[in-house]
């Protein structure tokens, strides 16, 4: 336990002294401001596809909170799952891939992939990981430490994006009306996204220890896995989330982190640390 605490303190110290971490935080803050200001200024602009002749009209966000989430995901109450009000709405959530559905807070889950893969890859490129395990450090402790650091980094990026959304919404003059979701739904939505970050952090650590020095490979693997799970995020963390959504994301984050962490530990145990 003492070795694990020392490892975690070292990783957290590296995190707070990492230039890349603060760059990621800055990007997370600037992204919603740029997106909301751009979409507001270009709203109504028509773009014509020269090959098909199809005309697309740039749509604006209906409110500043739409960049955080939308209502109508899977709301969990009393142990049962409430589906969206209509099948048409559910299909729209699953298939709508316009700019508003893609350029939102869920992009942070992809940004975390780059950060975690670079963070883990540096250990193997510098020889730190090999020296660490030569001192009989436990591979499970290493994986858990990296997963917790990734989770913390992802949570910090989500919070910065939220702050940027408030600033961007104010600059763009968008409404801050929460509709049926209410303030409680917004808080639960953010908590659910933060806890769900545990699943993605564990996946990215797995990709990092698999690829080791090949950071480019770990990033590709992580982004591929993120793409497969991307549509799960808005469904599990809608703007009108409740305590059951938060609990399920927390439980899923812990269970998946532990399960995937075992896979990462086995990879470190069965492969060369180069």
Image: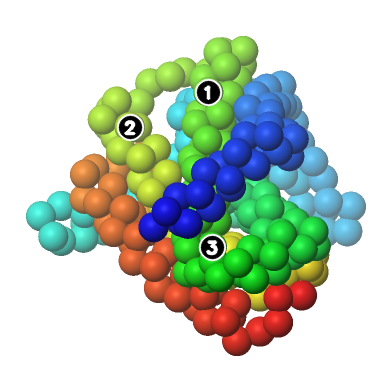
Q: Earlier in the sequence, mark 1 or mark 2?
A: 1
**Label 1, label 3: how far apart the Cα atoms are:** 32 Å
What is the number of the mark on residue 199? none
What is the number of the mark on residue 142? 3
Crowd tier of the residue under label 1, counting other residues whose Cα lies within 10 Å: few below 14, some 14–19, many 20 or above: some
For disc 1, the marked residue is: 163
User: Which residue occupies the foreground of this view, 274 or 47?
Assistant: 274
The residue under the point 50% across, 69% down is 138
Q: Earlier in the sequence, mark 1 or mark 3?
A: 3
Indicate which label's residue lies in the foreground, 1 or 3.
3
The residue under the point 58% across, 63% down is 205
For disc 2, the marked residue is: 187
Q: Single out the residue that lies furthest toward the front.
A: 135
Crowd tier of the residue under label 2, counting other residues whose Cα lies within 10 Å: few below 14, some 14–19, many 20 or above: some
**Label 1, label 2: how far apart the Cα atoms are:** 13 Å
Q: Single out the residue that lies furthest toward the bottom.
A: 270
The answer to which image quadrant residue 44 occupies is top right
- Image height of 18 relative to 253, above or below: above
Q: Position of residue 218 (x, y in %)?
A: 71, 67
Relative placement, left or right, of 47 versus 222 is right
The residue under the point 56% across, 37% down is 157
Q: Position of residue 112 (x, y in %)?
A: 61, 50
């Amino acid at each position: 336990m003492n070795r694990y605490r020392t490892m975690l303190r070292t990783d957290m110290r590296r995190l707070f002294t990492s230039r890349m971490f603060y760059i990621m935080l800055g990007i997370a803050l600037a992204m919603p401001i740029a997106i909301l200001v751009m979409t507001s200024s270009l709203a109504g602009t028509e773009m014509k596809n020269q090959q098909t002749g199809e005309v697309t009209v740039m749509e604006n966000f209906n409110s500043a909170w739409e960049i955080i989430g939308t209502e109508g995901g899977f709301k969990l109450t009393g142990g049962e799952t409430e589906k969206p009000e209509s099948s048409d709405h559910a299909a729209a959530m699953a298939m709508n891939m316009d700019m508003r559905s893609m350029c939102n807070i869920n992009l942070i889950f992809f940004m975390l992939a780059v950060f975690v893969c670079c963070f883990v890859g540096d250990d193997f490129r510098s020889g730190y990981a090999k020296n660490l395990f030569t001192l009989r450090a436990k591979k499970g402790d290493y994986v858990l430490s990296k997963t917790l650091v990734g989770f913390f980094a992802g949570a910090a990026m989500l919070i910065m994006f939220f702050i940027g959304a408030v600033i961007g919404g104010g600059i763009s003059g968008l409404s801050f009306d929460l509709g049926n979701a209410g303030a409680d739904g917004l808080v639960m939505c953010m908590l659910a996204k933060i806890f769900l970050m545990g699943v993605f952090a564990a996946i990215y650590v797995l990709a990092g220890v698999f690829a080791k020095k090949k950071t480019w490979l770990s990033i590709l693997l992580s982004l591929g896995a993120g793409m497969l799970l991307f549509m799960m995020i808005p469904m599990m963390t809608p703007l009108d989330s409740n305590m059951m959504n938060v609990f399920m994301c927390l439980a899923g984050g812990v269970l998946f982190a532990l399960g995937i962490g075992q896979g990462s530990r086995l990879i470190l145990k069965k492969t060369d640390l180069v």
